[in-house]
Amino acid sequence: MRRVETDILVVGGGPAGLSAAIAAAGAGARVDLVDAGAAPGGQYWMQDPVAGATSQQAAEGSTAIASARAAGVAIHSGAEVWAAFPGGEIMANDAEGPITFQARSIVVASGAQDRVYPFPGWTLPGVMTPGAGQRLAKLGKTAPGRRIALAGNGPFLYAVAATLASIDATPALLVESGRARAAMLGLLARHPARIAEAVSLIAAARAVPDWRRGHVVTEALGEERVEAVRIAPIDERGTVDTARSERIDGIDALLVGWGFRPMIELTALLRCRHAYDRALGGWYCVASPSTGLTSVEGVYAAGEVTGIAGSRPARLSGTLAGLSAAAALGFESAGMEERRKGLVRALASARAFGHALGRLAPPPDGIADLARDDTIVCRCEEVTRGEIVAALAEGTRAVAGAKMWTRAGMGRCQGRICGSAVAEIAAAETGTSPAAAGFNPPRIPLRPVPLDVILEATRGSAP
Amino acid sequence: MTEVTIFVDGVAVVAEAGRPLGALMHRLGPAMRRTREGAPRGLFCGMGVCFDCLVTVDGVADRRACMTPIRDGMRIETSLASGNPS
């Protein structure tokens, strides 16, 4: 079995992970980076697997990947982490089988995934996350459909509209719950450096022929695939007004997402402290703003796992965590303290913008209530809202209790998809808060792996 | 760009090597499997998190199409064709 001893193991090859790896290797540490993607870059710096960098954003990523390699970072692509143990032992699995890393320090830069909430019809083929539509277009050069509806909230929707336009697949319909125009202008006035980016994103949204603000998709309709959507306005009190709903036919792809959720499975498995803020994506790993250190010695966190804030804070927090992790192991260089001070200041400002944006575009309250009693909430185990509500009525108030009663969150995804919704349903049904309802603690294996991989990794030889 | 031939439920399909199998399956679909309860499912998260795009690749069951790069000669079987839920 492959065993790699290293100073610093970086988990995640997006902007935060690559920045951390470059900084730590530049300081003199031996650095390994493990990433689940076929190529590094993560979601933001996604690399076209055939054509190479095809946009300025992807080109920035390929520069970062080249810098990491030039700095001596060993990049392990296509390798998913499935176990972690105190003391720095991390187990991953790639096409060749298990790799065990023994690291003196770990930087977790696991990123984020689309945040989703259930609604009738959301399991139909053709209904997917905006991120899935983005990856279909960028990695697969494939349009999600011929008449695409893009829905939810947050600036990422506009970025997806721009990507789809780049492959001649401009959405037919954009359904956005927010209407906070004045607040957005106020935020941009305080961060003028971001105006050009905002203008180009708004142009992408304007190119969509039917743009509904203050609306949500309440239902996807179809038998074997999505064929139509129902949308409804949000009234002055923030309630979805289903009495004024409208059916839009001829939709063959529906991309719905409510911003992002930090991927906290690894930091939770490592027992780092976490906190809850719905505007930051829900549960996130708490990391020191001046070093990136988590509550666990030798474990650092950077980027979206520390709360959704965007790619700039991801890069800055990655560099900061990489430098700090290296310095803590004795890899100090001249001028490092000054550099860290500058990073801390820039990070605070970049995060303030990202967090303010998150507060301007939250999922509407009660969004999990779009699911009806017979709507599947847990996609893996096919558990309905009615079954979860019945379990809550029988006495549990927690996400973990709902899981034991109904199996919601016990499937292959371990509740990564339904967890936010189960917590909000539990909060609404039992008069508690989503934070008090908790989350599904991650279990080893974090991702399903073949038994022979587990045997080889734990016994040290193939069976 | 390298064009290769892969087989989806026995049917030859020309595809571009290196691109995600999930994108090709979505074009052919969008349904790519059936659940225990018989419901059709397709690509949902597209990034290896949700496990909705499971197919059998070269005899190995429950591979995520979204995380599988296309290779020449690959043989894909879906639960839509086999009737065995995945």
Image: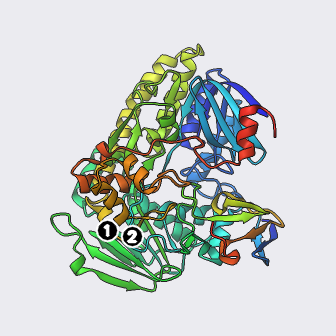
Which label is found at residue A370? 1
Asked whether residue A318 is in view, the answer is yes
Instruction: Check the image and report above or below for A340 versus A198.
Output: above
Q: Quadrant of the C terminus of chain A?
A: top right
A252 displayed left or right of A455 = left
- State whether discs 1 and 2 lie on one chain: yes
> Could you say which is closer to the camera, residue A302 or residue A333?
A302
Q: Residues within 10 Å of mark 1 (few under 14, many from 20)?
A: some
Mark 1 — on which chain does it sit? A
Q: Are marks 1 and 2 in contact (CB under 8 Å)?
A: yes
Where is mark 2, residue-wise?
Answer: A375
Number of on-image labels: 2
Quadrant of the rendered image containing residue A13: top right
The residue drawn where x is 55% and y is 28% is A322
Q: Residues within 10 Å of mark 2 (few under 14, many from 20)?
A: many
The residue drawn where x is 37% and y is 39% is A351
A225 displayed left or right of A313 = right
Across and down, in percent, residue B60 comes to 75, 59
The residue drawn where x is 37% and y is 75% is A219
Give amino acid for label 2. Answer: Thr
Marks 1 and 2, the one that precedes in the sequence? 1
Q: Disc 1 or disc 2, which is closer to the eye?
A: 2
